[in-house]
């Protein structure tokens, strides 16, 4: 039997509430945990990962640069070198031997001395050339000569070594009276530093590069600096970093964040006093976000599946619940037969079928005789047992297709499908005589009951009510006729059988 619309609506509301609670709860939990992971990931990048990379690179730089600076400083104060210059640079051999010794002993890439007096460039293999202020490659010497600081670090190509990119430590040399007499120092290849940078970039997916105090990129990995920027380019040419130079000041280290084409970047900047450069360690969150997003999507997918499974189970449960409620509403709990509501549903359909198929249909209305007396004599429980037994007899004695219902109290109704008056009368008689002959044992007593039956065959104009009304009139007559009998109510002006 269908449930009332209000009940269905309240079920729908329950499902909707559950969807909102489950789905909403899962969504909020997933988003909150995504945000928390994002926050902790950002904090870990800014406060731990990038400073750690910076520390590592810095300590490598120190290892690679501080020692050469000390060696160059020592060369600039060397008495042999200064005496040799002051004595007129007479024999090249002692100087080249000296430079060779320094280079080999300290494992430098190159070592050199340029004399102010003769403008001669000495290196380990002898005289390389004369420096010329008009030669762009020699400008470095004249810059060093004029600078205030005692030395500079210059990344340049080494003319003596196939123009390989080299970090030169250019130290000023003075005589004992403080007069400038030349520049000396060693050079080391930047390959080692570049390899280190490349390794960090590859392993940790971050960009490492050096910028001088004017904002010029001075050293990068093999693939260039941020967004592929090349050595010599300025920060102001790199998208997202245009304004950073102004923020940096001098010298200033710190953490910075910027956006490049919608991607968030985290930047650790460290001033390296030995180089007068900034070390930049830059990481964008793109790759990391992908991982987090995938986890979020997976979470949401699992939540969706769990919600769907819960909903499917719930709706099945509710369907069964509805069905059992519907069954309860249409079934008589004492006999297990359909009750009056159940009967109305079944009978409506049976009448339709009979009319459509032009087949006869007969209704029997049965009432147990003197049932009150039985109740009064043996008790209500005895009456219940008789009713149950009687219902069972009806079910057993009729076809599956026949409709047997408890009409109310001690009254029952039967619709015999595809059955006309004569057969129905025969069947009714059989039921009546079977009941009369039967005994219902109860607490050692064999109870006995008879039934009166009213019978009416459906005629074309009959409604369910009119059909039952006529069967009821038949029943009335059966009672009047002394009970325990069958009375057929004619469908027209027929007489009583
Ligand atoms: N034990 C039991 N008794 C019921 C039930 N339903 C109705 N009755 C009783 O059935 C009796 C019917 O009594 P009446 O309507 O006076 O009819 P009757 O005693 O059968 O007399 P007639 O129908 O005239 O033969 C009443 O006493 C009801 O209380 C039930 O479910 N169980």
Image (spheres, rainbow, N blue to C red):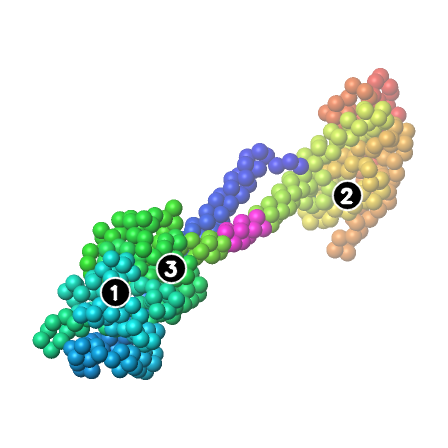
Q: Is residue 350 above or below residue 165?
A: above
**Is 76 colored magenta in this rendering?**
no
Span of residues in magenta: 297-309
Q: Compute the Cα span from label 1 to label 3.
A: 37 Å
Q: Residues within 10 Å of mark 1 (few under 14, many from 20)?
A: many
Measure how far apart labels 3 and 2 are at the Cα level. Answer: 89 Å
- Where does label 3 land, which residue? 207
User: Residue 131 got which mark?
Assistant: 1
Residue 308 part of the magenta segment: yes
Decide: few, some or many residues near mark 3? Use Cα within 10 Å; few <14, some 14-19, many ≥20: many
* Residue 232 seen in this snapshot: yes
Camera-side residue of 167 and 452: 167
Task: Select label 3 or label 2 by which is in front.
Answer: 3
Q: Is residue 248 above or below residue 121?
A: above
Element type at mark 1: loop
Where does residue 9 sit, x and y in percent of width and height?
Answer: 54, 36
Q: Of the residues tagged 1 and 3, which is closer to the observer? A: 1
Q: Residue at x 24, y 62 (%)?
A: 132
Tag 2 residue: 391
Q: Secondary structure at mark 2?
A: helix
């Amino acid at each position: 039997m269908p449930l009332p619309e209000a009940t269905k609506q309240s079920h729908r509301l329950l499902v909707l509430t559950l969807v909102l609670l489950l789905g909403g709860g899962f969504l909020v939990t997933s988003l909150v945990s995504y945000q928390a992971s994002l926050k902790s990931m950002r904090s870990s990048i800014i406060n731990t990962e990038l400073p750690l990379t910076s520390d590592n690179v810095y300590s490598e730089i120190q290892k690679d640069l501080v020692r050469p600076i000390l060696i160059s400083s020592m060369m600039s104060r060397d008495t042999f070198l200064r005496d040799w210059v002051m004595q007129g640079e007479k024999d090249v051999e002692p100087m080249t031997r000296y430079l060779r010794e320094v280079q080999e002993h300290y494992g430098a890439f190159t070592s050199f001395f340029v004399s102010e007096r003769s403008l001669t460039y000495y290196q380990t293999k002898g005289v390389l050339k004369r420096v010329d202020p008009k030669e762009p490659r020699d400008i470095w010497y004249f810059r060093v000569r004029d600078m205030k600081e005692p030395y500079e670090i210059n990344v340049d190509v080494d003319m003596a070594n196939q123009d390989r990119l080299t970090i030169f430590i250019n130290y000023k040399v003075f005589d004992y009276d403080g007069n400038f007499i030349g520049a000396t120092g060693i050079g080391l290849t930047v390959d080692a530093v570049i390899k280190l940078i490349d390794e960090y970039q590859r392993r940790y997916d971050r960009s490492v590069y050096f910028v001088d105090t004017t904002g010029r990129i001075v050293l990068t990995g093999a693939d260039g600096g941020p967004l592929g920027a090349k050595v010599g380019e300025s920060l102001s040419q790199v998208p997202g970093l245009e304004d950073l130079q102004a923020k940096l000041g001098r010298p200033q280290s710190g953490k910075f964040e910027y956006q490049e084409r919608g991607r968030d970047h985290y930047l650790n900047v460290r001033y390296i006093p030995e180089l007068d450069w900034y070390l930049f360690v830059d990481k964008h969150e793109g790759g990391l976000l992908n991982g987090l997003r995938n986890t979020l999507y997976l979470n949401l997918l699992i939540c969706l599946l769990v919600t769907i499974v819960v909903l499917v189970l719930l709706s099945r449960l509710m369907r069964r619940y509805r069905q059992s409620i519907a069954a309860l509403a249409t079934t008589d709990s004492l006999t297990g037969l359909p009750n009056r509501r159940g009967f109305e549903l079944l009978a409506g359909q049976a009448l339709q079928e009979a009319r459509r198929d032009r087949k006869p249909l007969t209704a029997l209305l049965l009432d147990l005789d003197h049932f009150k007396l039985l109740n009064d004599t043996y008790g209500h429980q005895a009456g219940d047992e008789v009713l149950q037994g009687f219902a069972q007899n009806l079910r057993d004695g009729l076809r599956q297709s026949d409709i047997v219902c408890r009409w109310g109290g001690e009254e029952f109704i039967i619709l015999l499908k595809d059955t006309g008056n004569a057969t129905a009368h025969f069947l009714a008689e059989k039921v009546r005589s079977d009941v009369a002959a039967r005994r219902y044992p109860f607490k050692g007593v064999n109870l006995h009951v008879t039934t009166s039956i009213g019978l009416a065959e459906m005629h074309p104009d009959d409604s369910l009510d009119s059909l039952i009304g006529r069967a009821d009139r038949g029943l009335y007559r059966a009672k009047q006729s002394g009970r325990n009998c069958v009375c057929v109510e004619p469908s027209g002006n027929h007489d009583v059988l």
